[in-house]
């Protein structure tokens, strides 16, 4: 039975890392917003050309364009046996469009990786990247000090400009305003599951897999 999965979560929740692992385990494509846009632009489709024109001006891609990109991507052969969407939908309008795109297919499983804002701020302000090899250092656990040197090459670790606290809090405000309403949109569906993202990554992965299995079983039971 195909797994059509939407993974939600705020910046710093570890959504991208978990999405890659889960998609590989379930043998479905991990489809992120960035991937979809790059593929559409590279493919030279009508939607891709429109997206490229907007992106080259430094502007945000509209709901209309991103929905068109998603529609094209999910029509490809590798997504017919299931998919994992990461970074889409971001708004209720996009979620409504996604429901239309997948109408008649197996229902969506939606999982939200939930992490409190203060933990997200701690994680993101502690994040460091190597100035020499570009490796991202592991984020220290609560109470541990932030490393100064790269464990791979010994280079100095630096903080990205967008990982300053004031920038992070603004990103979280934008997320709360634009994306958190998605939780209200999906919350009452039998295939929606929250997962505690404040745990160690291995524990989050285990709970995420269990949540997906449970939601799939619920969907299968209702279909039967």
Image (cartoon, grey):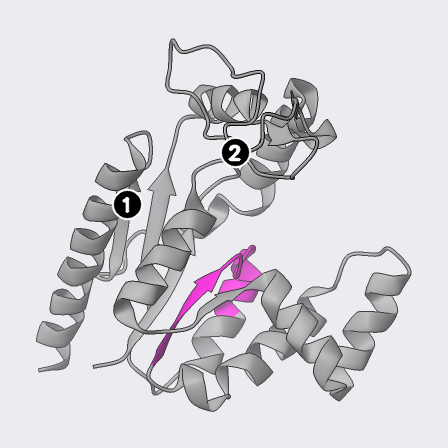
Q: Taking 216 as reference, is 127 above or below it?
A: above
What residue is at 59 percent from the left and 27 percent from the top? 128
Q: Residue pushed farthest front?
A: 153
Q: Is residue 89 magenta?
A: yes
Query: Which of the 4 image quadrants contains residue 157?
Result: top right
What residue is at 68 percent from the left and 70 percent from the top? 38
Q: Residue 152 carries which label?
A: 2
Q: Which mark is residue 214?
A: none
**Magenta range:** 82-96
Q: Residue 191 location, x and y as percent?
A: 24, 62
For marks 2 and 1 on the same chain, the one whose residue lies earlier in the sequence: 2
Residue topped by disc 1: 194
Crowd class of label 2 (few under 14; some 14 to 19; many from 20; radius 10 Å) = few
Q: CA gap, disc 2 to disc 1?
A: 35 Å
Crowd class of label 1 (few under 14; some 14 to 19; many from 20; radius 10 Å) = some
Residue 203 in the figure: left or right of residue 173: left
Q: Residue 220 location, x and y as percent?
A: 13, 75
Q: Is mark 2 on a helix, strand or loop?
A: loop
Tell me if residue 107 can be seen: no
Q: Is residue 118 magenta?
A: no
């Amino acid at each position: 039975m195909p797994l059509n999965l939407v993974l939600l979560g705020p910046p710093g929740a570890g959504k991208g890392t978990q999405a890659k692992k889960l998609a590989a385990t379930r043998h479905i494509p991990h489809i992120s917003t960035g991937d979809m846009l790059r593929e559409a632009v590279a493919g030279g489709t009508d939607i891709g050309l429109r997206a490229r024109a907007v992106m080259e001006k430094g502007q945000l891609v509209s709901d209309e364009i991103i929905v068109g990109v998603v529609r094209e991507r999910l029509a490809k052969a590798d997504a017919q046996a299931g998919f994992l969407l990461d970074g889409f939908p971001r708004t209720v309008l996009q979620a409504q469009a996604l429901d239309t795109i997948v109408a008649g297919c197996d229902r969506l499983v939606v999982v939200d990786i939930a992490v409190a804002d203060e933990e997200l701020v701690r994680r993101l302000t502690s994040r460091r990247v190597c100035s020499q090899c570009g490796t991202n250092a592991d984020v220290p656990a609560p109470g541990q000090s932030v490393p100064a040197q790269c464990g791979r090459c010994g280079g100095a670790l630096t903080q990205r400009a967008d990982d300053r606290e004031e920038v992070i809090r603004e990103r979280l405000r934008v997320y709360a305003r634009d994306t958190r309403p998605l939780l209200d949109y999906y919350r009452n569906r039998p295939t929606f599951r929250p997962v505690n993202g404040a745990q160690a990554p291995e524990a989050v992965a285990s709970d995420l897999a269990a949540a997906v299995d449970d939601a799939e079983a619920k969907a299968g039971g209702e279909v039967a």
